Image: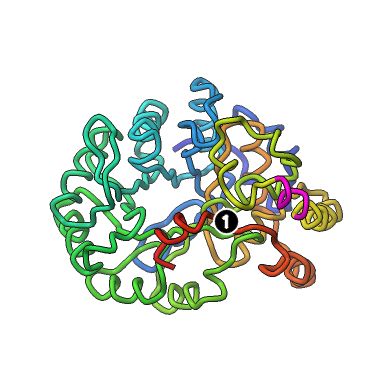
Amino acid sequence: MAGEGRPSPDPRPRNVWSFAQSRGERTRAMKTVQLGSRGLSVSAQGFGAMGMSGAYGASHDERESIATLNQAVDLGITLFDTAESYGPFENERLLARALGHRRDEIQLATKFGLDFTDDGQPGPLDGRPEHIRRAVERSLRHLNTDVIDLYYMHRVDPDTPIEETIGGMAELVTAGKVRYIGLSEVSAATIRRAHKVHPLTAVQSELSLFSRDLLDDGTKETLDELGIGLVAYSPIGRGFLSGSIRSVDDMDVDDSRRGLPRFSQENITANLKLVQHVRGIAEQRGATPAQVALAWVTAQGAVPILGTRRRSFLLENAAAAEIVLTADELSALDAVVRPDTVSGARYTPQQLASTNR
């Protein structure tokens, strides 16, 4: 295995600069955790590849993306998250090109949902078993693998009973095409119904200092009760909590965030005051705001997935896995950055309606 023969990682907290010193080295520094109670062991942080296929603007460099993905494996990240809708299809193909030679070092997670044609034209949400069987074969082909480690339904189909959908996903486990199953952006009630048909390993939802609905509405409590892991996407508030966005003009003209309420100029200006509070705590720790934001998500019992496209940001974000916030620091964050102090919704009303929350 990579990293054999190297000294054991220094147990003392290290910041981004000590990670940078090991740039290019094959290390196994990041600890592993159990995702749920079904036996899936993953790195404490995962990697979300969506942004590498144009979601945050068209300007991306495939060579840098491939280098970033490989460096993530070098740092000990094992869980890589994609979906057939990213691109569509292109993100799955990118992971196959970048990490196909390292398949035995990683866990692949992907998602189905919309009824895509083979040339990528989207149709409606479809949770019927016959659609699931078509979708998984296509994802297996695009990922160039014979098994998907974690297979999610991206958004729940309101026209198909969740029991029927989960039954179709369970068939894939029996057939050996999928190892574990999960759902994305679902309510506690839906989770309970689904889990009765076949045990869920993970639920993926947005979770950050700015978006914590699932902590307040009983969803996280349900996951803990049932032994289901939580995977958090957008843990840095779609990049906002890093402090790098101060204006709408800081995003590409085709960046999808421009269409989200929280990224209007008025809301950006208001929320920058909250970022300054995060920055103050970060400076006391010798960390960055992004690292503190990630450490807060980890403290909620979730596995955050990093969504960077560049190696420099990956090194910074991965270093957050070694930061454990104190009770006082967590209280200081929660006292200021709360749902009632964050300006703007995370999604448009139409997008929120599709989340089954």
Taking the image as shown, residue 244 lies to the left or right of residue 98, namely: right
Q: Residues within 10 Å of mark 1 (few under 14, many from 20)?
A: some
Can you identify the residue that label 1 sits on?
Answer: 346
Q: Residue at x 25, y 67 (%)?
A: 162
Q: Is residue 48 above or below residue 38?
A: above
Q: Quadrant of residue 216?
A: bottom right
Answer yes or no: is residue 22 visible.
yes
- Amino acid type of disc 1? Arg
Number of numbered discs on residues: 1
Left or right of 87? Residue 68 is right
Which one is in front, 30 or 221? 221
Name the spot of residue 60 as percent of width and height, x first.
Answer: 54, 25
Principal secondary structure, stretch drawn in magenta: helix
Tell me the residue at 60%/30% (across/down). Answer: 253
Q: Residue at 70% x, 68% y: name it.
A: 338
x%, y% of residue 72?
53, 37
Q: Magenta segment range?
A: 265-270
**Measured from the top left, where is residue 54 in percent x and y?**
49, 31
Q: Quadrant of residue 41?
A: bottom left
Return the x and y of residue 37 as percentages of the image width and height.
38, 68
Residue 266 belongs to the span the image colors magenta: yes
